[in-house]
Structure formats: structure tokens, C-alpha cells
Image (tube, rainbow, N blue to C red):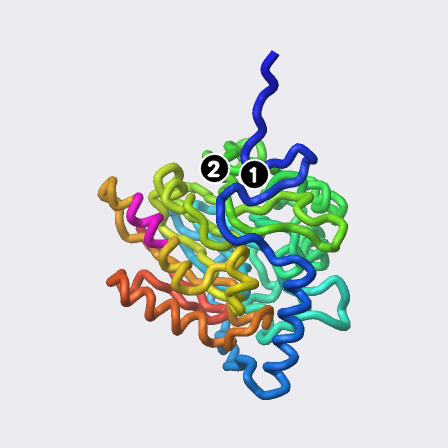
Amino acid sequence: MTLPSIPAHHLPSGRFRNPWPGPRLPGLGGVLRWSLERAWRGRFGLRGSGRAPASVTPSIRSARSTTNELRVSWIGHSTFLLQFGGLNVLTDPMFSERASPVRWAGPRRLTPPGIALEALPPVDLILQSHDHYDHFDEASVRALVIRHPQATWCAPLRLGERLRTAGVRQIVERDWFGSATPLNGGVFGDTKVTCMPARHFSGRSLADRNATLWCGWTIEAAAHRVYFAGDTAHHPDFGEIGRKCGPFDLVLMPIGAYDPRWFMRPVHMDPEEAVAAYGSIVEAQAARGETGTVMAAMHWGTFVLTDEPVDEPPRRARAAWAARNFPEGNLWVMAPGETRVLDR
């Protein structure tokens, strides 16, 4: 009898890995080297600083979107409120002061959430990419469970148990390229979510490295399709994502937390790689005559996680965008609390 093969990103131990060739995340020696380099750069004033983005007053006009419009509000970091197809969708909800397992240490927010958690409209769907503290914030999860118990949470494999521990009851858990529709017994109509590959890792301690999967998500509702890339380094499957699940109206793409490259390249894209990933998606769609996809920048300007200046990612992203001759209006670098609208 031939045993079924396991997917390339699964390990026989039950843990997960990145299946593509390329650089691997440095181990303890790399962490020590980076710590020493940061201390040296800080001593001589060589570490990046820069200004955090200024917040704007939220402009959510109503609790629900109209039929044809897609409303996009940046709350900060990788947290967006998406309003389309009559649904309200959150990505990687992070509303706490620190991205840390403790309240007294760890990266602190540079700007408050662009929309306060208590000011959110009724939330229907929540897309969770992985379990790192700047993306999976247990305090935010528990608060959302209390305020929005009707919400369905979408999570990659084995992250559902952590959500259940935090009080979540309605969970869709999928492997890469696994889809779910209809959701919530059809309450959301023909809405479809699909778990997408990402190049990253997981773990909230030394003991649980890669015990849960990491991912991005696509969501289709009414006339719109959105791709939330999650937290990811560059990988060769962006074109396949565009071919299989596009065309997208909107791509939420990470552009920050990339320096030093020798340490961060295996897990985070720099702005040029983010624009190249977008390029792979739209080129795959253009082969079918489909154009007009907007890229909204995320994963920058909220926490100081790495060494680049806080305000450098959007500058480099705009320069890379111009170098590729992409339409200027299709790159959205938003302020916390800002809402923009796509109307199809």
C-alpha cells in the first residue's frame, strides 16, 4: 500500500516549514549577532529613527458598505477594517499598547489604533495570519469575542486551538489553498475565503516554533476580491495566487520590518520585494486582460521591530512603484484611521 504524501510545507513531526529554496531564519547565533549590532549602532547614533505616520480622524460613514463599494480603513500595522459585500472584515486584529507577552516590556505602539476597538461596526469575519505577538494579540481577541461574538475567525492549521482557548467559538481552519464557502451556514451568502501560502514562521516561545501554520488569505464577496498577504518574505507563488484566486481589487501587502537584510530576508519583504510581489500578481492577471488592482501598504509605522527608519518603507515603496511604471493612484500609503473607497 502506498502511503499518501504530505504537502511540502508539512513535516512528518506535525510541524511546518517553508517549502521553497533560499535563506533560512538565523538561529540563536544570529539573534546574538543582531543584538550586538543594534547595541553598537545605538551607541554611536547610527540606528534608524524617523517619524511615525500621523493619524487622521476615522471616516467610517456607516455600519455597512453599499453593494458596489469596497471601503478600506487602516487601523495600524497589519490591521484593516474592510467593508464590502455587506460584510465587515478585520485582518490580524492588534489593538494593544505593546506587541509582547507582557504589558511592561516589548515593542510599544508609536500611534494609537486608527479606529478604537470599541468604535468598530459589527464584525462578521476576522482573518488571522499567524500567531506572532504583533499579529495575534490575545487581549484584542478576547475583547472582540465579547463585543462581536457572532464573528467567524479564519485561521491556518492548528491556530484554531489557541483561538478557542481565548474564547472564540466560530472558527474556519484551513491549509494552504484550502477554501471555505458558504461561511456561517450561508449567512454571508456566497462569500469565499481561501488560505494562501506565505514565507514566514510561527511560535510564541522557544518551545512551539512552527507548531502552527502561517498564511495569507483571499476573500471573495459580492463584486470584490481582496488578497491579504499576511506576514511574509518574498516567495515564488505570488503569480500562482494571482492566477488561481484573482483578479483582485485590492492587495494588502507588507512593506516594513526588513533591516538588517541578512537577518530579516527569510521572513519579511523589503519595499522593493513587496512591489515585485505585487508585480507578479498583476502580471498573472494581465495575461487574462485584467488590470486595476490597488496595493495598500501595511506592516510599517506602528511598531519599531527592526532597524530601518520608521518612515523609510513608504518612501522606498513609492520609488520602486515609479520605477516599474505602475499607475501612481494604485499604490495606497494610508494614515492610521484613514478610509479609502474603491467603487466598482
Residue at 51% x, 65% y is 261
Could one spot residue 87 in this view of the protein?
yes
Which mark is on residue 131?
none
Q: 50 above or below 226?
A: below
> Crowding at label 2, few (<14), some or many (≥20) Cα neighbours within 10 Å?
some
> Crowding at label 1, few (<14), some or many (≥20) Cα neighbours within 10 Å?
some
Q: Say left or right for 306 vs 238.
A: right
Residue kind at label 1, given as amino acid type? His
Q: Depth-wise, is mark 2 or mark 1 nearer the camera? A: 1
Q: Which residue is mark 1?
A: 9
Q: 104 above or below 148?
A: below
33 vs 206, nearest the viewer: 33
Name of the residue lying farthest toward the left: 289
Residue at 52% x, 69% y is 259
Q: Say left or right for 317 vs 90.
A: left
Q: Position of residue 275 (x, y in %)?
A: 37, 59
Residue at 42% x, 44% y is 237
Q: Which residue is mark 2?
A: 192
Residue at 71% x, 64% y is 100
Residue kind at label 2, given as amino acid type? Lys
Could one spot residue 152 in this view of the protein?
no
